Amino acid sequence: MFMAFAWNDVFSLSILSAIVTGITIGLVYAAGQLMQNPRFNVWAKTEFFQVIVSVILVFLTLFLVGLIGLDPSADMVIDAGWITALSSVDVTTVYENPQIGATDSVFDTDEKYLKNLAFFAHRSVRASRALMGSTDEMSKYTRTPCTPAILLCLMGVNGINVRPLSGAAAYMQTSNTLLFTSTSAYLTILAQIFFLRFIQSGLIIVYLPLAIILRSLPFMRPFGGALLAICFSLFIIFPMLLFVESIFWNPYEWVGGTWNEVDDFVGDLEGQSEDAAYGDLFKSVGDWHFSDINNMVPGIIEMTSSAFVCATFLFAFNITVVSAASLLFARLLGAEVDLSRLVQIV
């Protein structure tokens, strides 16, 4: 783990935090009794109740964290096999880049699911770049008029060239937009992967015991409750959202066979570019018809659009749900959490 503490230590730290806080409250209560100050007594009774509530919430959170696989020592863990058992989707066969195992935990399933989305977005980047390069080269292809061919072009006009494939330049602006969109989608998915790894880093081991102490300190209860609410939302709600979304949010299924057609076409295109010299690329125009690329443009647009929706809409939706969940949970704890700025950034 990233942290110096082991997962088993979080229980000890939580209990230790509760004991230290309880001792502090006891000292305040004793001082109130000694000085006959009712404010001290009321504060001590109120905070003692809050400590009990905090401990219960922390251990409930730890149980849920272990349930989704963040705690390797948990006895009960939700895995990818639950998806197959509770739905008609078998994620172990739907995704192949990489393949999800039936015993993968929620976090393992989430990371592999995001990697599949990243692979799809990368293929969109590859197709968009191939479209840009091919249309650019095709629009530059020139020929010298041969008039007449029967006289070996002896009457051809000197210094004049024609561009029979110049119409391919019409796709240049389209390919620029597609490349920008697919690249943005790819980087956004990578950001989600690193965000998920941040959640897996083990920082919750420190956050939860700290929340117990802060909720019992004067003027720090709102911050402690907010910290506990954020932990609950980030470490539980966000991974579970991705876990459920892997069932029905599958871009490979959206585009169907278009994905393979575009990928094969781009592979053939790259093979021609690697095997042939620059001057031989258009030696046989029949091997590289403008209509062939024209037929692939709708498929490339469909792939790029699907990658963009998966990357941007999905991430924005998940962050919005996390923000709403933290706000609701914080209010139950008597605190306020405003993650609207985080949503605006997204």
Image: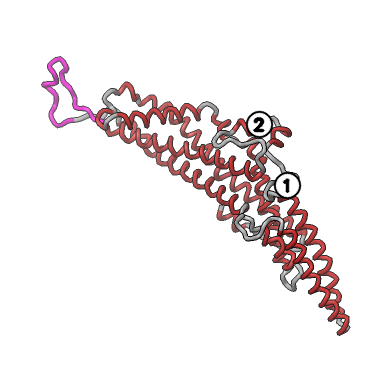
Residue at the top extreme, as displayed: 150
State which quadrant residue 5 falls in. bottom right
Give the residues drawn in magenta, as a range. 141-160
Residue drawn at x 35%, y 36% is 133
Q: Looking at the picture, tell me which residue is in the foreground, 4 or 171.
A: 4
**Which residue is disc 1 drawn over?**
67
The answer to whether the residue labelled 2 contacts the one labelled 1, judged by CB atoms less than 8 Å apart, is no
- Picture coordinates of residue 169 (x, y %)? 33, 35
Classed neighbour count for the residue bearing mark 1: other residues with Cα under 10 Å, few (<14), some (14–19), many (≥20): many
- Picture coordinates of residue 134 (x, y %)? 35, 33
Per the image, label 2 sits on a secondary structure element best described as loop
**Which residue is disc 2 drawn over?**
90
Q: Looking at the picture, tell me which residue is in the foreground, 4 or 172.
A: 4
Question: N-terminal of the two: label 2 or label 1?
Answer: 1
Quadrant in which the N terminus is drawn = bottom right
State which quadrant residue 15 falls in. bottom right
Q: Is residue 325 left or right of residue 33?
A: left
Per the image, label 1 sits on a secondary structure element best described as helix
Q: Is residue 146 left or right of residue 258?
A: left
Tell me the kind of residue under disc 1.
Leu
Compared with 225, 308 (above or below) is above
Residue drawn at x 80%, y 65% is 51
Q: Looking at the picture, tell me which residue is in the foreground, 311 or 64.
A: 64
Residue drawn at x 65%, y 49% is 238
Q: Looking at the picture, tell me which residue is in the foreground, 269 or 172.
A: 269
Tell me the kind of residue under disc 2.
Asp
